[in-house]
Image: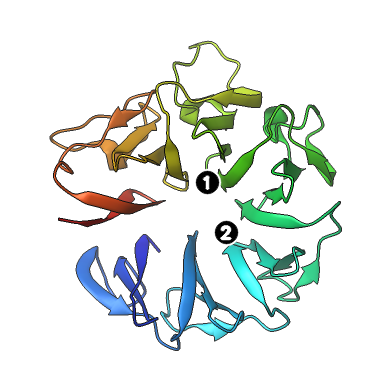
Amino acid sequence: MDAGYALRQDGTVWSIGRTGETSGLSPQPTQVRGLDNVASITGGHRAGFAVKGDGTVWQWDNTMTASQVRGLSEVTQVSGSSVSHLALRRDGSVWRWSDLDNNPAPVQLPGRFIGVATDGVSYFVVRDDHTVWAWGSNYGGGLGVGSTESNVSQPTQVVGLDSVTKVAVSRNQSTYAIRSDGTLWAWGSVFLGGQDYPSGGPYTYSAPKQVPTLSNVVDVAGSGWNYALALTADGTVWAWGSLSFADALRTPDMQPTQSPSKVPGLDGLHVSGIAAGGYQGYVVASS
């Protein structure tokens, strides 16, 4: 499902792109059925998720009809993937569930948490002291926890990071963190690290590295297929990705670059939000 989702001010959710109801990439928005009073949304691979104003969680696939995820309440944030998902509750606890068992259960974590992100195999959470903790698949040391084990079962602190306000994870084994000073940090796959990478490897950053040339970052979207987007406080959108596979960045005015470059065509617009998914990038902007 190569689709993007938009939350309207009236609390309804709309999809644009390829869904189960369109045979191609249609620009005509389609409303997701069964949703109202939605407070926030997020997209996962072949799935979408919504948190309603009452704290319940709803999920849909290419049928474009949402159903409630039972067993979750007072939720403030969701991060979903193709199979496994995380939810953050108002009490700071983190819950996990899978499409295979559909039975949400609390994750045993050290402390109270304020943010969650997952790609379905690796899991990242921001604690209320603004440190980042991770567990799950650790291919090439990409969790950033200082371990070379292929899988880390116990939540472990990501090394060298503090003052984190947001964490985001991509579908390509890259993770990003925004610090309170507006700097952006990346670890995992070097192909999405925002800087030149060696042709002969290694191909994984096992510890966070600052993404160069960017400052005053207010948002990051890493779930595009081999590309990432960042929004800075002045309303500029930046993009970077794999030179071989970042098809979303190939336009008449722009080509993939390893380091962040300004997205053209947005001058004169006030950009207030960004999103990345599959081979499409999105911005929310007004004139």
Above or below, 148 against 17 in this view is above
Rendered image quadrant of residue 31: bottom left
Q: Earlier in the sequence, mark 2 or mark 1?
A: 2
Q: Are marks 2 and 1 in contact (CB under 8 Å)?
A: yes
Using the image as rendered, state which of residue 268 and residue 248 is in the foreground: 268
Q: Residue at x 62, y 40 (%)?
A: 164
Count of picture labels? 2
Q: Which residue is mark 1?
A: 171
Using the image as rendered, state which of residue 124 and residue 225 is in the foreground: 124
Q: CA distance from mark 2 to mark 1?
A: 8 Å
Is residue 201 shown left or right of residue 258? right
Q: Residue at x 50, y 27 (%)?
A: 193
Residue 34 image point, x, y percent: 45, 89
Q: Which residue is mark 2?
A: 81
Q: Does any portion of residue 226 appear in the rendered image?
A: no
> What colour scheme governs how the chains and residues are painted in the rendered image of this protein?
rainbow
Residue 4 image point, x, y percent: 35, 62
Q: Residue at x 21, y 67 (%)?
A: 26
User: Where's the N terminus, which quadrant?
Assistant: bottom left
Above or below, 229 against 64 in this view is above
Q: Which mark is residue 61?
A: none
Q: Residue at x 55, y 85 (%)?
A: 67
Label 1 crowd bin: few (<14), some (14–19), many (20+), radius 10 Å? many
Name which residue type carries label 1.
Arg
Rendered image quadrant of residue 205: top right
Using the image as rendered, state which of residue 154 and residue 100 is in the foreground: 154
Residue 95 image point, x, y percent: 74, 66
Using the image as rendered, state which of residue 40 and residue 80 is in the foreground: 40
Label 1 secondary element: loop
Rendered image quadrant of residue 235: top left
Name which residue type carries label 2.
Ser
